[in-house]
Amino acid sequence: MRTKESSSDYRYFPEPDLPPFAPDAAFLRGVENALVELPEVRKQRFIDSFGLSEDQSDFLCEEKETADFFETAVKLGADATSAALWLASDVKKHLNRSGMSLSQSPLTPVRFAEMLRLLADKRIHGRIAKSVVEAVFAEDKDPGVIIREKGWEQITDPAALGGYIEKVMAANPAAVTTIRAGDSRPTTFLIGEIMHATSGRADPALVQALVKQKLAVSVIQILSLGGAIAGTTSAQGDVGAGDPAEIMRLLEAEGRISRKIAFEEGEVGRILSEEITPEDWARLIGLIDERLRGGRAAGIVVTHGTDTLAYTASLVYWLFPRPPVPIVLAASLQPAGRAGSDAIPTLRRAIQAADEMEPGVYVAFGGRILSPVNLKFERIAVDGFRNWNMEKPCHTGSPLFAEVPFAQDRDALRARLEAAINTSLILRVYPGMRGDYLIELMDRGVKNFVLELYDTGTANLRDSPYSLRRALLAARDKGVHIFCTSQQEGIVDFSRYTSSHELWREGAIPMGPLTTESAWTKLVVCASFSDTDEEMLSRMEQGNADACL
C-alpha cells in the first residue's frame, strides 16, 4: 500500500560492471543500415512498387526466402505479376511434391527469370512453360538448354507457320471448302492438324489468327444451355425445356441474321436452368474452352435460364477471366413467343455484344449488359437482375491459375467439379441455428462451407448450442474451411462487431464484397484445380478486397 514516487523508492542503482554508453551518430547509422525490412513493410512495398494484389504480396512475404527469390527474379527481368502467379502455383506445386525449399531446389532466380522471359518473348507458350519448370526440377538444367535439347522453342514466324498451314489446307480440301461455305466447325480440326504438324511448337494464338485470315473465318458461336430463353409454354402456361434450334428460327423470322452467326447446340442440353448439374457445367466449360482454343469463334453467346444464371455466369468468369473474345450469357424471364417476352431482343443484344465488345465475360438481360460476378437474381426487382457491391462493371479479372488447368477429357473435368461440389455446402445463418448441425455435416464429409452471415459478418457466438462457436472450434480441429458472405448486400470485413472479431479469431474467412453465388463458384473452381488446401485458400482470398474483382 506504500506509494512509490521515484527511482530511489524502488532501490534502483547503477550496475558497476556496465559502464555508461553514449552511441554516436555513426553507430546509429550502422544499426539502421543493419536492420532487416519487416514483413508488413515489405508487403506494402511489393503492392506499391509492383502492382501486386494484397493476397499475392501476403503469399510472397510469408517466407523471407520466397520474397528474396521473387525480388531477385524481378531484378533479373521477370515480370512481377507473372512471377508472383507462377511462384504461387506451379513452382509451389513442385516444391511440395519434392519436399524441397526454394533454396534447395534446382530452380534458381536466374533460371526462373529466364523461363518467364522466354514466355514473355513468346519463344515458348504457357503449356511448354509448365513443362520447362517440371524439367528444371527433374534435370537441373537451364530453361534455354532444355528447350534447345527438346526442340520446344515456339514457332512465331508467320512465314514459317504459313508453310505448315498451306500443307494442312492442301491435304484437307473438303474441310477448307466447308469453312469457306460458312460452316466453321472444321476449323478446330485444321488447327489441330497444324499444331500436330509443328509438334505443338506453333504459337496457338498466331495459328488461329492466320487460319482465320486465310479462310476469312469470323463467327459468333451460339451455345444453348436451355432455360426459359429457349423454352416452350404449355396450354396451361407452364414453361418447359424446348428445342434450342427453335429460338434461332424465331430470331431469323424477326429479321436477317448475319452469316457471321453460327448456331450450335453443342451437346450442352435441353434443360431448365434449375435442373443444371456438374455434368452440364462440364459440357459447357469444355465447349467454351474448345471454341477459344480452336479459333472457331470471334465471340460466344450462351443462352441460359434465370434461376441459376448467377452461378453459371460467375463460374465462367472464374474459369475464363481473360478470354480472347467476348463471352456473353443471355437470359429472359419468359420464353420466346410468349406475351411480354424479351427473349429475341435479348438474344440480339447478346449477339451484338459478342460482336462489338472488348474480350471479357458479360451477361445480357432485360436490355442491359451486366457483370458476371456478383450477379443477383431478384424477380421482384424491376430489372430482375442487378450487381451487388460494385463501383464499376467487372468483365475481366486476374487469373486464379497461371493457365486454366482444364482436363482435355470432359469426364475428368466433370469428376473434378463433382468432387469439389460434393464436399462443399452453402448455409444461411438464422436466429437459433444450432452449431452441432454443422458438426454433423463435417462428419459426413463437408470440407468447405459458405456461410451467409448477417450484414457485415455477424452471427451468434455466445457459449450456447444456438451459436456457431462449437462449429468453428470443430472446423479448426477437423481442417474444415468456412468462407463468409453477407445476406444483406454487405461487404464482409469482420471489422465492426465483437462477434465478427470472434469469427475471424477462429479462422473463418471473409469473402469481402463477393455475393454468395460468386463466392461459391470461386470455391468450386479453386477446390477443383488446386493440389493442396494451402493453394486453394490462397486462391480463395485472392482479390476479395477489391470492389471490382
Image: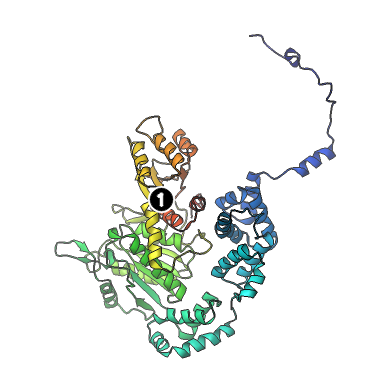
In this image, 175 relative to 67: left or right? left
| Picture layout, residue 285 above or below residue 182 | above
Query: x and y percent of residue 25 in the render?
Result: 83, 38
Query: x and y percent of residue 369 in the render?
Result: 39, 63
In this image, 95 relative to 419: left or right? right
> Which residue is at 22% across, 69% downward?
337
Colour treatment of the image: rainbow
| Picture layout, residue 202 above or below residue 163 | above
Question: Which residue occupies the extreme top position in the image?
Answer: 2
> Which residue is at 56% across, 77% downward?
201
Residue named by callout 1: 515
> Could you say which is closer to the camera, residue 397 or residue 532?
532
Query: x and y percent of residue 31 in the render?
Result: 78, 40
Residue 51: name its quadrant: bottom right
Can I make out residue 409 in this image? yes
| Picture layout, residue 237 above or below residue 174 | above
Q: Residues within 10 Å of mark 1 (few under 14, many from 20)?
A: many
Q: Secondary structure at mark 1?
A: loop
| Picture layout, residue 12 above or below residue 50 | above
> Which residue is at 31% across, 55% downward?
382
Q: Amino acid at mark 1?
A: Thr
